[in-house]
Image (tube, grey):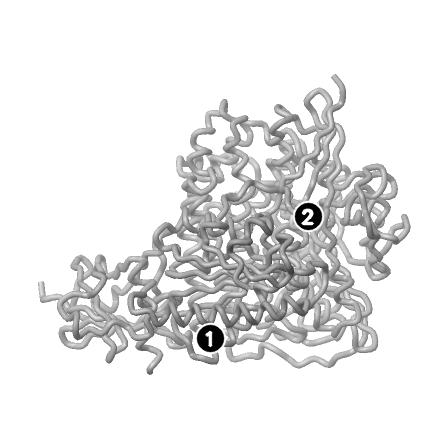
Amino acid sequence: MAVQTLDISPVGRVEGDLDVRVEIDNGVVTNAWTQAELFRGFEIILRDKDPQAGLVVTPRACGICGASHLTCAAWALDTAWQTTVPRNAILARNLGQLVESLQSQPRYFYGLYAIDLTNKKYRGSRFYDEACKRFAPFTGTSYEAGVTISGKPVEIYALLGGQWPHSSYMVPGGVMCAPTLADITRSVSLLEYFKKNWLEPIWLGCSLERYEQIKTYADFNAWLEESPSHLNSDLGLYWRMGLDIGLDKYGAGLGKYVSWGYLPHEDKYQKPTIEGRNSAVIMKSGIYDGATGMHKLMSQEFARENTSHAWYEEGTGDTHPFDRTTTPKSKNHIDFNGAYSWATAVSHMDIGRLEAGPFARQMVAGGTHGEAWQHADGFILDVYKKMGGASLHLRQLARMHETVKLYRQAERCLREFRLNEPWYIKPQERDGRGWGATEAARGALCHWIEVKGGKIKNYQIVAPTTWNVGPRDNQGRRGPIEEALIGAPIADPTDPVEVGHVARSFDSCLVCTVHAHDAKTGKDLARFKIG
Amino acid sequence: MENLAAPAGLIAVIGCGNLNRRDDGIGVVVAQALQQWVQDEHLQGVSVYDAGTGGMDVMFKARGATALIMIDASLSSSTPGSIFKLPGEEVIDRPEPGYSLHDFRWQHALYAGRHIFGKAFPHDITVYLIEAETVTLGLGLSPRVSQAASQVADMIKQLIREKTNSPASALSHSAPSDTPHAASSPDGARMTVRQGSIFIDASTYARYFLGLECIVLLRQEHTLMLLPVRHAAAGGLLMKVRNAQGDRVIHAQEFFRGQGIDDDREWTGSLQWNEQRAALVTSWPAPS
């Protein structure tokens, strides 16, 4: 049977988000290209602007991870200006990041990922009826509960930052807020609400304390069998159904992972520097290479971008982001042998292309590298080893496994605030280079800034989706999502749900594009014209 | 104290768009102007949000309001700067699954909100669209669109004035007085006390407490007063959300025990707004 080529563009809008091309041979994906239509362009907007412009512009880079961008923008300036950041401010920034990520967990799982489980392809599964009952959009019991609860954690963000998603409350030298005891009390009750109404009863079917005892795959399986409420929780149902329908059989990807680490400790990063960050973050940075089983620390100096297959006039060599010029080509067309994306191919200078995201974070958390006081958790790495490698099912388990940890860290921030201590120390502006990073819900995010003559000379962003959705590099090596699509079995080329599973398991977050209402033509609108 | 007399906000105004894409940001620009106006005019009952490119969050911001006004840019090949005013029904749209949460736009959020929140979601929806001239990367509106933005801001101010002044509307500036309705509240608002907790439904909450999270309970002889707490630092008891409809519960065991009411005492009472006391009042139950 001839190779069949399938172009999948999920949204027929003015500009698509993520488009995928796959070649299918004998019902299996044998080649794949991911194409990001969108040009971030913040690098160009920010050129020659006031150094603090990044605090206002970049949180609008994204309608779902504005806090993550703000975190990076603030830390980047802190390192460039050599500020002092008070411990309360570090906690307030971490809390903003954490509640945004908590918000993303149910919203992503029910709003994007789990809908595919109700696809008619899975009618034969013994879990199908229950999946439809819970996960069908708008009518599913868990869909409704999960989407509704997702609005709660970011109410805490609004208490700190005035609004979510686009706030600029983090500034070099601290934060522009001073929560009252009432704000803290409310935040505690909002977290509690999230736990009592979704995380424990619906997602886990048990207490956080019971779930936290799980350290290995064997523990997890024992937990599943321990009680019907575990077995029938959304986590229990998802895990069992995924095995039943074979989600553990494909979607593995590159097998190499990256995390910048996140959550600087409030007592260890008050004098922020680029070099000092690795030993100051609670969740350690690192890379994990599945082929060698090695963990190493990650550092921004290892990052490289390659634009050989992207629409930039920046040569074919690997470039460190500080040295990029961001020179876009105009009048582009898609040429899968040549340039076909606005995303660059990001890599580690020695290890090559890497997958970013919550799965990568858990693979890194399993290592013994880093400092003894830093967080470590071997659960997902153990499942990876016991199951013989990665899959999109494991990527999903890893993502949702993090929820309880995010919750605990948010609780900790609220406990640690000292309301009578400072939140901001006015910094001295100066020229220099800075770098700020975090882990957005969907993966490693960082900003590089170079300030010269009191203005931004160069601003560069590498987002999780830049790592994951990037095109081939100058050696023709596929990007992480492209690689993860290889081997996916396509039962019905007219409804390739398997491609959707893989693509969605990365929770791609491209630039927030034009959001103008484009569903109506001028003719449609003519009768509503009032001015 | 004057502000305390008015019931909390029932009109939600939400501007959407991407400020980094020139005219695409017009909804946000208008919303920011209206936020300033609401603040300057000390308007109660109107909440204005800059939702940016958040999409799904629109459903949470609109929840509980009785009227919703949306503002966004349009790309319809019309003359740039054209202003369109549409009823919500024209734009509400069921979302199709995409590869990214970014595909979930405000028109989908309206669909989701209606389905999930039902009666607690506004039915009166007005949408203003302004035709964009350029949506390239960059900051600032083009001149024609900028002019349209101030026109739309004025139109919305007028619309808000109409809605808040209409006597038939629940948006009236003055709260219903208790004197003409001494026997029963005009909309039959009630509360139930069970196990030391007060239960109120979503519509009562929306009518008297919208946007607030705390109340203070006060007993004066034969009257129980529920006072809205507007300042975050003032404390009070939390009005916790019970379910997707937005019904509320206030855990007040200690308060009732302190007043000699046991946890197993269950009772219901009708609620009336008392302007002088700036509180919802109900009768204290007879001793059991």
Residue B26 lies, in percent from the top left, at: 60, 64
Are the residues tagged 2 and 1 within 8 Å (C-beta)? no
Q: Is residue B236 left or right of residue A499?
A: left
Residue A482 visible (yes or no): yes
Identify the residue shown where x is 19% and y is 65%: B185
Q: Please identify the quadrant where the C terminus of chain A is shown.
A: bottom right
Identify the residue shown where x is 63% and y is 54%: B75
Q: Please identify the quadrant where the N terminus of chain A is shown.
A: top right
Calculate the distance from the C-alpha at mark 2 to the C-alpha at mark 1: 36 Å
Mark 1, residues whose alpha carbon is within 10 Å: few (<14), some, or many (≥20)? Answer: some
Q: From the viewer's side, name the closer residue of A395 and A124.
A: A124
Q: What is the secondary structure assignment of the residue under circle 1?
A: helix
Q: Is residue A290 left or right of residue B16?
A: right
Circle on res. B38: 1
Q: Which residue is mark 2?
A: A15
Question: What amino acid is labelled 2 in the image?
Answer: Glu
Q: From the viewer's side, name the closer residue of A227 and A511.
A: A511
